[in-house]
Image (cartoon, rainbow, N blue to C red):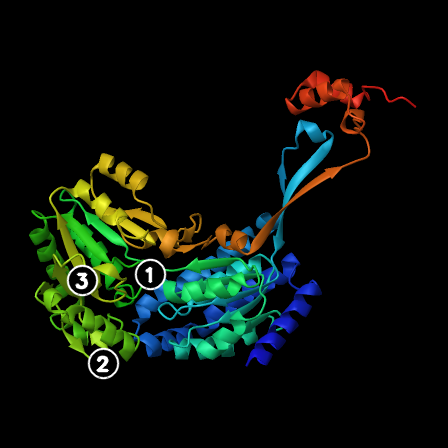
Amino acid sequence: MAGMAEETVRELRASFAAGRTRPAEWRAAQLKGLIRMIDEKEAEISAALHEDLAKPHMESFLHEISLTKSSCKFALKGLKNWMKPEKVPAAITTFPSSAQIVPEPLGVVLIISAWNYPFILSIDPVIGAIAAGNAVVLKPSEIAPATSSLLAKLLPEYVDNSCIKVVEGSVPETTALLEQRWDKIFYTGNGTVGRIVMAAAAKHLTPVALELGGKSPVIVDSNVDLHVAAKRIVVGKWGCNNGQACIAPDYIITTKSFAPELVASFKRVLERFYGEDPLQSADLSRIVNSKQFKRLTNLIEEKRVADKIVYGGKADEKQLKISPTLLLDVPEDSEIMTGEIFGPLLPIVTVEKIEESFDLINAKPKPLAAYLFTKNRKLQEEFVASVPAGGMLVNDIALHLTNPYMPFGGVGDSGMGCYHGKFGFDCFSHKKGVLIRGFGGEANARYPPYTTEKQKILRGLINGSFIALILALLGFPREKR
């Protein structure tokens, strides 16, 4: 297995060293190939997502297929500009000279994807890596086997297989890949595996981007348009893979006095969206596997949590379905409030004053996303200024990741590094500073032996003195022949 991983890397290194991935034409051709693949194989992609997660076709199209295609198109449009060296000012101390920043591909990169959005979380980082001119190994998640084998089958048909490869498998295959030397590793998943990836990368001083998760909070102020807020939270939680999303709302914070109204509104919206028996709804994804199902049901079977359920709580192990579940005032030290939920359970925490929410959030590790629903401008400004998070959205859920002009990534426990749009290109590029000089502009003052006179000119130069520059360029102090 290690031999196979080694051989794959060797082959990709040879392709990269031959300069195959560097021309803009090659990069554009691969991105066009991905667009063609999405256009021609949409039905197959959607079927694989349904097989892996019972993901509704509408959800697959909106959240995975169309976003990935938009990402490809955005990269194609920006590619030539992104690749251009960026001219920057040159300092007076190096006059005459020109300075630029040249984006350079890192080399051979490894992308390890996640199971919850197995198509977009595989292809989106690949788009950035290709745009930046790298050779790529994609390791899709074995927990979404239908999508993984589809990617392994389709990618070689649409992109250059000598530079972009898919390696399938589980822990042994991933371990063998992590033993190799890479120029960057991009991992999407949980913090436990993130630490393993980072430790493996450290052996080779390989940089990493870690797209992790965390407990993404939603603060709901009492002055909101309640029905609109409830609809947006419900679709952002349960309409995003039944809560199995890294930026899905993990818990709500609202005031004690407003909580009953909010719960009542959630119940109305949930019933309208998913019917009286949500376990039969075709618009809710199932839990990915029995291991995750058991983990989630254990969270709500804990005695002091079970009696806090105010809506839902139904489960069907045969179908691997758990209904949307609301819990009110669960104990802060219960497992549901300490770890990331990653499923259809939504605890509601109450405070006396909405301003107390910030300390509550900041007492936990920094989340991947933080949300606030309010009409209060001052509260909004305080929220942005005082709550650290990977990204933020005011008065909606999850939509911030659809803007390709904004970076998407975590901070602290929710990850490091970011991508989307040009940030994806930058993630897989090295910014090389290049200074170019001619043979004119000789300043004798920079060469030994150093004298008081030379020091005076050099000090003047460093302080930006125009007179010192003229003197230096005129060759003062004169050298004795």
Q: Is residue 190 visible?
A: no
Q: Looking at the picture, which amino acid does disc 1 mark?
A: Cys
Q: Tell me the residue that label 3 is attached to.
A: 334
Please identify, in this view, whether the residue under mark 2 or under mark 3 is nearer the observer. 3
Compute the Cα span from label 3 to label 1. Answer: 20 Å
Q: Residue at x 29, y 63 (%)?
A: 240
| Quarter where residue 273 is shown | bottom left
Asked whether, in this view, residue 17 is left or right of residue 412, the answer is: right
Q: Tell me the residue that label 2 is attached to.
A: 319
- Compare residues 45 and 450 and report the one nearer the observer: 450
| Quarter where residue 171 is shown | bottom left
Tell me: residue 88, above or below residue 364.
Answer: above
Q: Looking at the picture, which amino acid does disc 3 mark?
A: Ser
Q: Looking at the picture, which amino acid does disc 2 mark?
A: Gln
Query: Could you say whether the residue bearing mark 1 is in a helix, strand or loop?
Result: loop
Tell me: residue 206, above or below residue 355.
Answer: below
Compute the Cα span from label 1 to label 2. Answer: 23 Å
Please identify, in this view, whether the residue under mark 3 or under mark 1 is nearer the observer. 3
Please identify, in this view, whether the residue under mark 1 or under mark 2 is nearer the observer. 1
- Compare residues 478 and 415 and report the one nearer the observer: 478
Tell me: residue 471, above or below residue 316.
Answer: above
Q: Tell me the residue that label 1 is attached to.
A: 246
